Image (tube, rainbow, N blue to C red):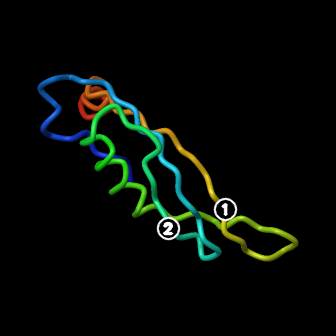
């Protein structure tokens, strides 16, 4: 699931970035989600919502699934989103 560009920011055309930190548990589920930094609170909210729905293959240590802490940047650009919607 991609993070959705916040509707309230569409008219502004604001470009944004959110750095997210979270844990992928031994079952591949996302837990302990934190916003490290965000250019706008609405971007942070959209990124958090998307990340909570993500699923991963868990980390493996000595053949056993383990939890892993990671950081992921998420970028928001309404121009790119519009291009994706209009281009095949």
Q: Is residue 55 above or below residue 86?
A: below
Q: Nearer the viewer, residue 27 or 31?
A: 31
Residue 24 on image: x %, y %? 59, 64
Residue 45 horizontal/vertical position (percent) = 29, 50
Task: Give the percent coordinates (x, y) of residue 32.
Answer: 49, 64
Q: Give the image quarter of residue 80.
A: top left
Q: Residue 86 vs residue 52: left or right?
A: left
- Which residue lies at the image location 61% right of the left edge and 52% below the top edge? 70
Q: Which mark is residue 79?
A: none
Distance in Å between CA atoms under marks 1 and 2: 10 Å
Q: Quadrant of the N terminus?
A: bottom left
Q: Which residue is mark 1?
A: 68
The answer to whether 67 appears left or right of 61 in the picture is left
Is 59 above or below relative to 70?
Answer: below
- Tell me the tag on residue 31: 2
Q: What is the quadrant of the C terminus in the image?
A: top left
């Amino acid at each position: 699931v991609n993070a959705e560009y916040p509707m309230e920011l569409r008219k502004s055309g604001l470009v944004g970035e959110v750095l997210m930190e979270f844990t992928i548990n031994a079952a591949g589920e996302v837990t302990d989600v934190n916003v490290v930094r965000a250019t706008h609170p609405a971007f942070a909210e959209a990124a958090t919502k998307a990340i909570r729905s993500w699923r991963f293959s868990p980390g493996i240590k000595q053949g056993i699934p383990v939890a892993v802490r990671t950081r992921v940047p998420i970028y928001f650009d309404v121009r790119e989103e519009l291009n994706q919607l209009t281009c095949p």
